[in-house]
Amino acid sequence: MKVERVLVIGLDCLTPQLAFEHYLDRLPHLQSLMKAGLWGRLRSCDPPITVPAWSCMVTSKDPGQLGFYGFRNRKDYSYDGLSFANSLAVREPTLWNILSRNRRDSVLVGIPQTYPVKPLRGHLVTGFLAPDNQSEYTYPSDLKQEVERVADGYIIDVKDFRTENKDWLLRQVYEMTEKRFRVVRHFLKTKPWDFFMFVEMGPDRLHHGFWRFCDPGHRLYQEGNPYRNVLQDYYVFLDRKVGEILEDINLKKTLVLLVSDHGAKRMQGGICVNEWLRREGYLVLREDPAPSSRLRMDQIDWKATRAWGEGGYYSRIFFNVKGREPEGVVPASEYERFRSEIKEGLEALGDEQGRPIGTVLHRPQDLYRECRNVPPDLIAYFGDLDWRSVGSVGMDALHTFENDTGPDDANHDRFGVFVLADPGLPDSQRGRELDGITLYDIAPTVLESLGIRPPDDMIGASIRRKALEGNGHRAAP
């Protein structure tokens, strides 16, 4: 059924075990949306990280098709380091590109990879890749004055969320969220729109900053600590803000999608990927590195190095291939054998006591429909994402329990959330949990709901259509 408008509420990193289980009885507005429609876990892309996940969602294309595999990507096969994937890297049509061509108005607030601004039919406040409030972070450009006035000083993102100053972080996240929702509510009432989408980064920042204080299963959890209810209280706060937005729209004519790009889970520790590569003889440095220091490309003895890696919530491992890299040493004829060797070696690496942790390494060609630009040679999920990848060198062990980029308690998980409140949904379908929904299904759902045929090359399919196929199995609480 066609609706007049679509509103997408994006809550970065909102995680199903908290939203749908632990805290649900304290979230009345989320419950009402679940009972009015369809809901469930939303499978993220690989890797499940903010960039590229939101762009995968709004294009219904995978990271290989988009040609970027994380925040930072190799520009070419040189050793010149990595570049950030901003809006200029997104070359596939987004939802708002398609809607603009169909003379539909869009309002976008805070969506990652929308900076630098690109023109559209509508209004845009870019996301956290904008460097600061002095940048041109809105379209049209004079919209910035309105945003700053309404928010009384807009906060694009909390830049230093990996900090020991937890009280400061908590204040910053609440202030950022309050200001973003203030701008969103203002735009809902004052701007023309057929499609409205915004993304709030607060859940992600608090998960990384406070997970160990709230999860009794975390190795650093302390009973009775002053931050033990931080995540619960913030979810309740978010729910109240969502409720305020729902009061501003006509729910009989508006399809509402509440989504997150990925979930979160406790972080057990870190695997020092470059230290493992050094110990196994795959990575050779010109001299011994300083203790716990960032790996620099000019440190590497390229004539003797076969592989190196990047740290993060997952690891990207690159090979030094003869005829591909400037000083490549791995013969192209031995590439697949070498890739299997690295994959098997890292998958066999256990925890600090040698116990298996379930690490999986993926070949990008097995994950994606195509691999544009410069993909990693391998993508590593250490301990099924229970362990992060630590890229530093000069470490005294292969396992660490301190994050090399600052305090961080959580890793990303493959599943975020979705709730679809569709006014045209048959009563028999309302309140159903659906399995098998992915973030690639969001864009086709939006387009079909607005009466626009989704492009044939989109990966996903309408959630409503999937529901009518009958794969839901549990009613909303």
Image (spheres, rainbow, N blue to C red):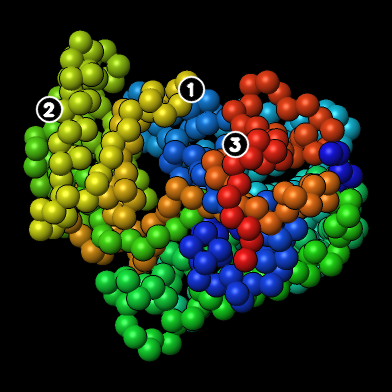
Q: Is residue 466 above or below residue 411?
A: above
Residue 206 placement, left or right of 294: right
For disc 3, the marked residue is: 440
Q: Please state the horizontal and vertical placement of residue 145, each as a whole percent of the image.
A: 81, 59
Q: Please state the horizontal and vertical placement of residue 241, each as a whole percent of the image.
A: 72, 70
Residue 112 placement, left or right of 425: left
Distance, label 1 to label 2, CA atoms, is 33 Å
Q: Give residue 369's mark.
A: 1
Please name the residue shown 51% across and 44% down the image. Answer: 43
Q: Are marks 1 and 3 in contact (CB under 8 Å)?
A: no
Q: Are marks 1 and 2 in contact (CB under 8 Å)?
A: no
Task: Kindly state the secondary structure of the residue where label 2 is placed.
Answer: loop
Few, some or many C-alpha atoms within 10 Å of disc 1 (few <14, some 14-19, many ≥20)? some
Q: Please state the horizontal and vertical placement of residue 373, each as a whole percent of the image.
A: 46, 23
Three-letter amino acid code at the position of disc 3: Tyr
Quarter of the figure that contains the N terminus: top right
Front position in the image: 344 or 286: 344
Three-letter amino acid code at the position of disc 2: Ala
Q: Earlier in the sequence, mark 1 or mark 3?
A: 1
Front position in the image: 99 or 441: 441
Please name the residue shown 63% across and 58% down the image. Answer: 475
Asked if residue 106 can be seen in this view, the reply is yes
For disc 2, the marked residue is: 304
Task: Kindly state the secondary structure of the residue where label 3 is placed.
Answer: helix
Q: Please state the horizontal and vertical placement of residue 448, each as a whole percent of the image.
A: 78, 34
Please name the residue shown 33% across and 36% down the image. Answer: 379
Please name the residue shown 84% across and 67% down the image. Answer: 247
Q: Is residue 103 above or below residue 386?
A: above
Q: Earlier in the sequence, mark 1 or mark 2?
A: 2
Task: Kindly state the secondary structure of the residue where label 1 is placed.
Answer: loop
